[in-house]
Amino acid sequence: MLIFIFQAIWFFIDEWAGKGIDLLIVGKFLVYYSPNLIPMVLPLTVLLASIMTFGSLAENYEFAAMKASGISLFRAMRPLIIFITVLSIGTFFFANSVIPEAELKSYNLRRNIAQAKPALAITEGIFNNIPETDINIKVNDKYGDNDQLLSEVVIHKLTNGGLNNQVVKSKEGELTSKKGSNYLQLVLKDGHFYEDIQGKTISARRKVPFAKAYFDTYTMNVDLSQLSNDNLEKENVSNTHKMLNARELDVAIDSLYTDNREVISSLSKSIQSRTGFTNIDGDHTAQRPVKDTIDPTGKSIPELMEFYEPWRQSQIVDMAKNNMNSTKRSIEAKRSDIQRRIKLLNVHFLSLHQKFALPIACFILFFVGAPLGAIIRKGGLGLPMVLAIALFLTYYFIGIFTKNYAEDGSMDPVWASWVSTLIMLPLGIWLTRRATADKAVFDPDSISEKFFNLFNFIRKKDSTEAK
């Protein structure tokens, strides 16, 4: 757990640096973020602990003493089987209630940290987006006692329509706001103001009108009251798939599925209406044209074109091409939205089934680690650590690959949630059988014996056929 927490600190350090965030807030974020690490930490922990425990018992000949006393391996594992069953059940309730709440807290706290005190985070040489405002600012250099003096300032302002049609450029600028103020005051000097003017008519917009003004001094006041650090735990977002429990995910999946069907149905009806064949639908009572009315001559479509004059043929072909191009553009315009909707539905399916797959994975990995430890007869942090990490990485990367395939629709998200767990199931059964029979993982003598038996059987069959 400590290793993954250090990884989180390294991952988020760019979002905390330069924000003036105290250690208490950082520590609170790590507490909120820690439950999100459980799906990675717990399977590895169960696997490593079971290999180390049973490897140590086998290394010290405890299992030999148990077997001499009539105690089988399964009987020795019985208390731990009960424990891992309780742990798996508890893991489901943890994944269903604690992890969504922790995700809610950590996501919103992280979002608020990223928006805190933007006046302190104006980086030189790049455009800095000031959250909750419509301003992007870029400066070439900051200097002065408190870095309050700016040079070569460029500011982009968005209008109410979300258009980037206002630009302010100045050679010099100064931050005159007081420390801790909710207002960022920029005093710009020796610059120009540019604005694209939106015409009311099409002909006016084609002329691309704009306004340009020169100023000696221009003061901008930006309200930063919404970005105060006083309420970093305000929960502005509460409906992402990671923040929902199983019941809420089931409702969300049903709603998303219905919405997707309506969007695709609407698109299909729109494309169908453009063809002109409005009766080609589910209405079986609609009058269908008979074959003779479509092609009374019995000729194919290309031959039917001969009934029209050349100019009319060209017109028909152009109309068909325009219709096809229009339909293609309509589909292309909707493609990204439909792909986004499908991905959103798939990640909800993944999140729902992963809540059930995690406790089952912990249970199965115990039956992989325990017999493997009994077979290798090594305890401690040496060989058991290597084997545990190798098996866990196999389990983890299979899960990552199937998740990526499921998100873009290349794989069923339900199967993707269970593939890595189901792959470990036969391995656990095989290792348990080998350990119960007191056999090694690989028995070279047994393999060579089977090979020679097969060779003798083939040779005997050939000699029989020769006779």
Image (cartoon, rainbow, N blue to C red):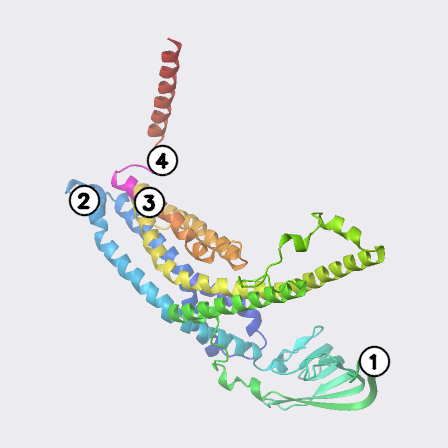
* Residue at (32, 45) in percent of width and height: 429
* Residue at (60, 87) in percent of width and height: 224
Residue at disc 1, secondary structure = helix
First in sequence: mark 3 or mark 2? 2
Q: Are marks 3 and 2 in contact (CB under 8 Å)?
A: no
Indicate the position of residue 184 as horizontal and vertical percent values. 65, 88
Q: Which residue is mark 4?
A: 442
Q: Which residue is mark 3?
A: 372
First in sequence: mark 4 or mark 2? 2
Residue 438 is covered by the magenta coloring: yes
First in sequence: mark 4 or mark 3? 3
Residue at disc 4, secondary structure = loop
Q: Are marks 4 and 1 in contact (CB under 8 Å)?
A: no
Residue at disc 3, secondary structure = helix
Amino acid type for the residue under numbered disc 1: Ser
| Quarter of the figure with the C terminus | top left
First in sequence: mark 2 or mark 1? 2
- Around disc 3, counting alpha carbons within 10 Å, would you say few (fewer than 14), some (14 to 19), or many (20 or more)? many
Residue nearest the viewer, comparing 413 with 37: 413
Q: What distance separates the C-alpha of mark 4 from that of mark 3? A: 12 Å
Amino acid type for the residue under numbered disc 3: Leu
Q: Which residue is mark 1?
A: 203
Q: Which residue is mark 2?
A: 66
Q: Which contiguous range is marked in magenta? A: 431-441
296 to the left or right of 102: right
